[in-house]
Image (cartoon, rainbow, N blue to C red):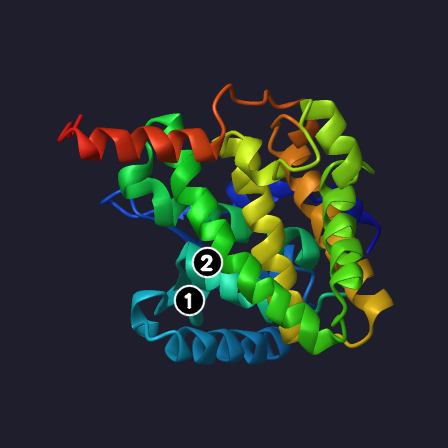
Amino acid sequence: MSNIKKYSSQTFDQIKHFTDEGIEFWYARELVSVLDYKSWDKFKNVIEKAKESCKNSGLEVEDHFSHVGNMVDVGSGAQREIVNIMLSRYACYLIVQNGDPRKEVIALGQTYFAVKTRERELEENYEQLTDDQKRLAIRNEMINHNKSLAEAAQIAGINDPRDYAIFQNKGYQGLYGGLGVKEIHQRKGLKKSHKILDHMGSTELAANLFRATQTDEKLRRENINGKEKANKTHFEVGKKVRQTIAELGGTMPENLPTPEKSIKQIEKELERKKLHGDKG
């Protein structure tokens, strides 16, 4: 379709609805059109896969996929009821994760719903945290997800530490518009011994967390095999996260300010407070 190029992250916000209680949801019948599926039956297969993923995650499927009926005009003033499904944001995320990755709008949706789902997961406490607290929370998540990403990369055929360094660099290059580890170090004024992730603000860390989690899932979901394919995947995911940031009107990660304190310094300050019994 020629109009697929008109799709942006705003497309998914434009078809968002709210219940009387203010809870956001999407209608499957509207999402099927946005995701460029010609057949409802084919889209139902994707929904069923998403439901299975939801069940395997230990969540109640009915909490995220609520079947409803909508009345539609069939001509001459007559109406009939069609099956529709109210989808949570997480349900939409699972649907695009199980969709056809060759579709540009599916790839955009994968990043969009991943970003928004992660924000929603953190939202309950997130806004009350200071930036330092946000940085620590995301950095700790990043440590765990990087372990999983390293395992996924190993399964894909990246076993040598030097190859893994190249793999990681590709992800940064995709997200940072061509800048790799060395260039980011220089831009931030860091020493070689410094870890880049320890010198990022919460927004920059979040972008890298999305990059890591989505690459991890894509490598595993598509059973990607071979160093070149894995490197390309990491680069493309980073690039897609960058595209979504642009679509949402955000600041590119290389243009975000470098915090004065490193994660290590924040952790040391917290340790000192604990030693002195200061709970503030």
Disc 2 secondary structure class: strand
The foreground one among 261 and 62 is 261
Q: For residue 59, what is the image quadrant?
A: bottom left
Give, as a three-letter code, the residue at label 2: Tyr
Q: What is the crowding at mark 2: few (fewer than 14 residues within 10 Å), some, or many (at least 20)?
A: many
Which mark is drawn over residue 85? 1
Q: Is residue 258 above or below residue 49?
A: above
Give, as a three-letter code, the residue at label 1: Ile
* Residue 15 as seen in the image, left or right of residue 107: left
> Percent position (x, y) of residue 7?
70, 44
Q: For residue 272, what is the image quadrant?
A: top left
- Disc 1/disc 2 C-alpha distance (Å): 6 Å
Q: Is residue 61 above or below residue 245?
A: below
Task: Determine if residue 222 is in view.
Answer: no
Which mark is drawn over residue 47? none
The foreground one among 38 and 53 is 53
Instruction: Please tell me which of labels 1 and 2 falls first in the chain.
Output: 2
Disc 1 secondary structure class: strand
Q: Quadrant of the image for the N terminus?
A: bottom right
Q: Residue at 46% across / 76% down in the picture?
A: 53
Q: Quadrant of the image for the C terminus?
A: top left
The foreground one among 84 and 109 is 109
> Percent position (x, y) of residue 129?
31, 31
> Percent position (x, y) of residue 252?
67, 29
Task: Determine if residue 225 is in view.
Answer: yes
Q: Residue at 39% across / 30% down in the picture?
A: 266
Q: Residue at 59% across / 71% down in the picture?
A: 98
Q: Which residue is mark 2?
A: 27
Q: What is the crowding at mark 1: few (fewer than 14 residues within 10 Å), some, or many (at least 20)?
A: some
Cβ atoms at labels 1 and 2 below 8 Å apart: yes
Q: Residue at 54% across / 39% down in the picture?
A: 205
> Percent position (x, y) of residue 18?
35, 45
